[in-house]
Amino acid sequence: MQRQQIYRFLLFLFTFVVFPVGFSYADNIKSVSLKKELSEAEKRKFDYFYYEGLNLKQAGKFDASYEAFTHCLAIDSTAAPVLFELSTFYLQLNRPEKALDLLKRAVANSDNNFTYRMTLASLSRNLGLYGEAAEEFEELVKDYPDKADLNYYLAEALTQKGEIGKAIEAFDALESVIGMNEALSMQKYKLYNTLDQPVEAFNEIEKLSLKYPMEARYQIIMGDLRLEKGELEKALEHYTKAKAIDPENPYYIVSMANYYEAKGDKEAAETQINNALINEKLDVDVKVSILSRYILKLSQVDKGSERANSLFQTLLEQHPEETEIKIMYAGLLVAQNKLDEAKFQIQLVTEMEPDNAGAWQQLLNLSLRSEDIPEVIRICNRGMELFPEAPEYYFYLGIAHYQQKEYEKALETYKAGIDIIPAENMPLKSDFYGQIGDIYYQMDQMDNAYAAYDEALKYNDKNVMVLNNYSYFLSLAKKDLKKAERMSAQCIKLEPDNATYLDTYAWIFFMQGNYSLAKIYIESALGKDKTNSSELVDHYGDILYMSGEKEKAIEQWQKAKELGKESPVLERKISEGIYIEDENPK
């Protein structure tokens, strides 16, 4: 795409860098100070293009604005304001490394400009250059002590860099200016936990509890910390205080259940949760929150799944109309590999909320996992009615028909699906054409199959499934073997450890009579194969035979038979002890 065409797609510039409160972009463009000495004529020309670039940018004419700033840079390559402006364009073009380079040059030529330095530090952090970001923020903190919130950005960069102790110091510096607040204390609490300093973590929460004595959750957090250390009685003291403040706090209910679990009183723990689930004063969202948190604990104990299921049943009895509960329960059942029960819950959701696209997707996924082809067909047909713009239903309906050898129906489905795929979703179009190619191949319409594969590769020339199938089928037909070799090589480049693709590559060399390379790649395929593929072993026998190793070839053919391959040609190869070409190799 030409440069002047690119910028018409820009809707806005430079929006993801976070600046401290009080920053004004307008402050940056009131005057232009240049490091390089220019003649009067150069100065006038520079000023014209610079301010013209700003005006064009404000008017949304980004292509022309970029050109104007580029003219400025040709006059003075050290002009920091221009370097800064150009960096914003590269950010929007998703070329952050180029933007970073321009920002570094802007800062080098104007090291007292807060905006440039702040932008450079923020971009460095976003790019994962935490060390550079931390260094820049540290300098900013020193140079601008009145901007206390810089300590927050410094602390974040230090945390990401892994210097947790220094990050806490930065938060402390910020706290000394703005005072103690929950956000800072919670940040330090998390950092102390990262450092495995539970006493310091506890102290941060304790300070909050003293400042906000009517906030139950601080007492609950302290109780949880005590519980983790096995200090059950001290934990109970905090929970008791929390109950006095807010007895229906969902965090309190879960923590008390965990407390009873720690004591070994499972009955009391479940009673705690059950009472919450049947409590009419608690809304369903709170109940779901309580149950979700408790299930995390149950997942760590024996027979926790059965207990969790029982609790879900209680909640479903209380709120049979709440589809979100059914979806959550289905997720738990899937984790337990109870797919039929999960499907039943999601089926109920689709009946109660036919327009719930997510539920239909889950139902389709569950049916695919259980290989229930009739159900897949039912869901896809219904999905196409409800969501006519969703191509995934066409895709999986085509697969279902294909598996049932209903090739005409599959073909019709994929051709209809292609028409609704958005033009920009070229990889999906490629997949659809790839499926069409496979169908035509099964229908023995080879020219149509090859044409479909060619079309698929127009939309995505790295579609490995298409590259592999196309190249393999060409090799079986002994047609365009050089083209097949190129496509198969591309597969190996994209997925070098894929045994199937290595087998295809080996077979192409076999068909070309290059048995040495064929042997190298088939042995590599067998080394990476985790499925005990009888097909690969059979191919290995063929290649060994043509390489002059006839006894080893027979051994491999026999092994292929033992692995489950059934073929009259294979039987003849074993009994006659010679290679026999399969004339119907599908």
Image (cartoon, rainbow, N blue to C red):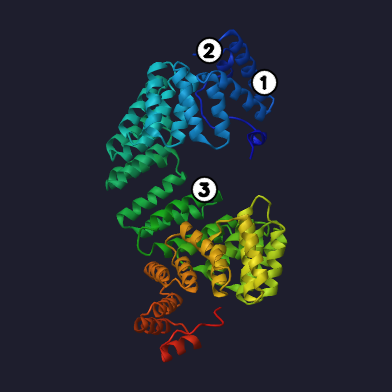
Question: Which residue does the numbered mark 3 point to in the structure image?
Answer: 286
Mark 3 and mark 1 lie on one chain; the one further toward the N terminus is 1
Q: Nearer the viewer, residue 269 or 390?
A: 390
Identify which residue is drawn at 55% across, 72% down: 371
Position of residue 451 in the picture relative to residue 551 (left or right): right
**Which quadrant would residue 520 be assigned to in this image?**
bottom left
Q: Residue at x 66, y 65 (%)?
A: 451
Taking the image as drawn, is residue 185 in sight? no
Q: Position of residue 333 (x, y in %)?
A: 49, 64
**Which sits in the foreground, 343 or 24?**
24
The answer to whether residue 507 is seen in the rendering is yes
Q: Callout 3: few (<14), some (14-19), or many (20+) C-alpha neighbours within 10 Å?
A: some
Q: Secondary structure at mark 1?
A: helix
Residue at image point 64% right, 22% down: 53
Label at residue 33: 2
- Does the residue at mark 2 contact the one at mark 3 (Cβ under 8 Å)? no
The C terminus sits in image quarter: bottom right
Q: Mark 2 Cα within 10 Å, few/some/many (few <14, many 20+)? A: few
User: Mark 2 or mark 3, which is nearer to you?
Assistant: 2
Label of residue 55 in the image: 1
Helix, strand or loop status at disc 3: helix
SS type, badge 2: loop
For marks 1 and 2, the one nearer the N-term is: 2
Q: Residue furthest bottom?
A: 575
Residue drawn at 69 percent across, 25 percent down: 59
Look at label 3 and name its amino acid.
Val
414 in relation to 138, above or below: below
